Each structure stands twice: as C-alpha cells, then as structure tokens.
Image (cartoon, rainbow, N blue to C red):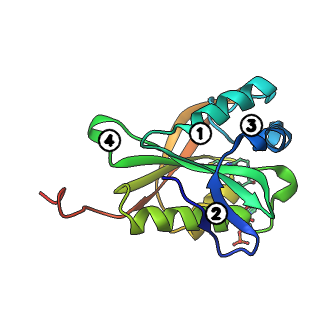
Amino acid sequence: MTVHLPTDLPGCVLRPWRAADKEDLIREANNRRVWRNMTHTFPHPYTDRDADLWLAIAADPGASIQLAIDVDGSAVGGIGVIAGEGIFAQTAQFGYWLGESHWGRGIASAAASALAQRIGTERLFARLEAQVFEWNPASMRVLEKAGFEREAVLRCAASKDGCLIDTVLYARVFGRSQAGAD
Ligand SMILES: CC(C)(COP(=O)(O)OP(=O)(O)OC[C@H]1O[C@@H](n2cnc3c(N)ncnc32)[C@H](O)[C@@H]1OP(=O)(O)O)[C@@H](O)C(=O)NCCC(=O)NCCS
C-alpha cells in the first residue's frame, strides 16, 4: 500500500519511508526506552547500518505495510503491519513506535486509528493483532482508542530486557469478505 494517509492530528500524516529519513530514523529509534517495548527485530543501539536495512525493507514490503509517522515534514516514528503467511494470510501483526521526545501528544493514537481504519475500509486484512508487553499500558490505551479489543493475557510469552513477561493480545477484527465467507 503506497499511501499518504492523513490523521486526525494536524500536521501528522502516514507516508512511505524515504532514503532522506535516515538521519531522523537513527535519532528517534536509537533509544533504549523505545527498544524495550519492541520485538527482537528492533535493534539497540540503532546503527547507520540498521537504518539502511530498515529503509530497504520498507521500500519493498510485499503484502505488509510500513509507513513513517510524519509530523510537520519529519519522520518521528514508524507504523505498519506484517502480513501473515499461509492460513494466516488474512491476519496481520500491527505495530508502531514513536521517538521519545514526541510521546504524550496523541500522535500514536492518531496514527494507529488512521491506519487501522484504512485497512478495515479497504478490507486489506480480516484481523489485526498486537501483543503488548505487560509493562506498556500506554500502548494498550493506544490500541483501545484505535478500536482493538483485549483478547487474552499470554502468560510468560516473551523474554525482553532480561525478564520473562506476559504479553497482552489485542485484536481488531473486520470479519469475512464475501469471497471468504464459507
Ligand atoms: C507507546 C507509544 C507508541 C505511545 O505513543 P504516544 O504518542 O505517546 O501515545 P498517545 O499520546 O497517542 O496516547 C497514549 C495514551 O496512553 C495513556 N497513557 C500513557 N501512559 C500511561 C500509563 N502509564 N498508564 C495508562 N495509560 C497511559 C495516555 O494518557 C494516552 O491515553 P489518553 O489519550 O486516553 O489520555 C510510545 O510511548 C512508544 O513509541 N513507546 C515505545 C515503543 C512502543 O511501545 N511501541 C508499541 C509496542 S506494542
């Protein structure tokens, strides 16, 4: 999906990553407090090479979607979905992050709502899922505001930062399209 997606927050849009974002990406992503809430695919420290790898992935995401969260012309974070495979092709893993200096201004809520809404309207996936670490209530709130429901607590499901932790499974379900109804 190559889109420029507006959000309800003035100055905040979702748009494709571009090579010129590299400096912004490293500055915003190279933060332990961001890393601590992400899966193992998000590195720390976040190096020049990591940024190159990410920009290459984002330029060719296949069935997945990867967008920059742009505020007033600068990339301040990322949001996207990773498409499932095989029998899970209609399910996508929903994820996002924001540079710490931008937290607490409603940006992630606006971004998550806009992307989930668009995916639902276009029926790009039947189900969006996110697993949130037990210590991340702000992200749980972001998902709730974007129409996700809390489905389960997955006990001791993840190892992060030296701790074995529960994750909370959230999902937003758009349901079956005509073709998939039987
Ligand atoms: C989680 C994260 C995306 C939130 O971004 P943000 O732009 O600051 O979030 P928003 O301002 O849109 O909304 C945060 C909501 O959580 C609430 N919140 C914040 N801290 C909270 C806490 N400790 N307990 C409960 N709610 C909290 C805020 O009040 C707000 O809700 P409200 O609008 O109803 O008041 C951001 O902190 C981040 O990138 N963290 C690191 C990476 C990450 O966690 N990614 C998600 C992985 S699942």
> Closer to the camera: disc 2 or disc 3?
2
The crowding category of the residue bearing disc 2, from other C-alpha atoms within 10 Å (few below 14, some 14 to 19, many at least 20), is many
Q: Which comes before the other along the chain, label 4 or label 3?
A: 3
Name the one closer to the observer, 103 or 134: 103
Q: Which residue has dot 3 on it? A: 35
Left or right of residue 131: residue 36: right
As shown in the figure, which amino acid type bears the numbered disc 2? Ala
Q: Which comes before the other along the chain, label 3 or label 1?
A: 3
Circle number at residue 58: 1
As shown in the figure, which amino acid type bears the numbered disc 4? Phe
Q: Are marks 3 and 1 in contact (CB under 8 Å)?
A: no
Name the one closer to the observer, 18 or 95: 18
> Closer to the camera: disc 4 or disc 1?
1
- Location of residue 71 in the rendering, given as x and y in whole percent from the top left corner: 78, 62
Q: Is residue 128 something that shows in the picture?
A: yes
Q: Quadrant of residue 110?
A: bottom right
State whether label 4 is within 8 Å of ligand 1.
Answer: no
Q: Which residue has dot 4 on it? A: 88
Q: Residue at x 59, y 70 (%)?
A: 145
The crowding category of the residue bearing disc 4, from other C-alpha atoms within 10 Å (few below 14, some 14 to 19, many at least 20), is few
State whether label 2 is within 8 Å of ligand 1.
Answer: yes
The crowding category of the residue bearing disc 3, from other C-alpha atoms within 10 Å (few below 14, some 14 to 19, many at least 20), is many
Q: Which comes before the other along the chain, label 4 or label 1?
A: 1
The crowding category of the residue bearing disc 1, from other C-alpha atoms within 10 Å (few below 14, some 14 to 19, many at least 20), is some
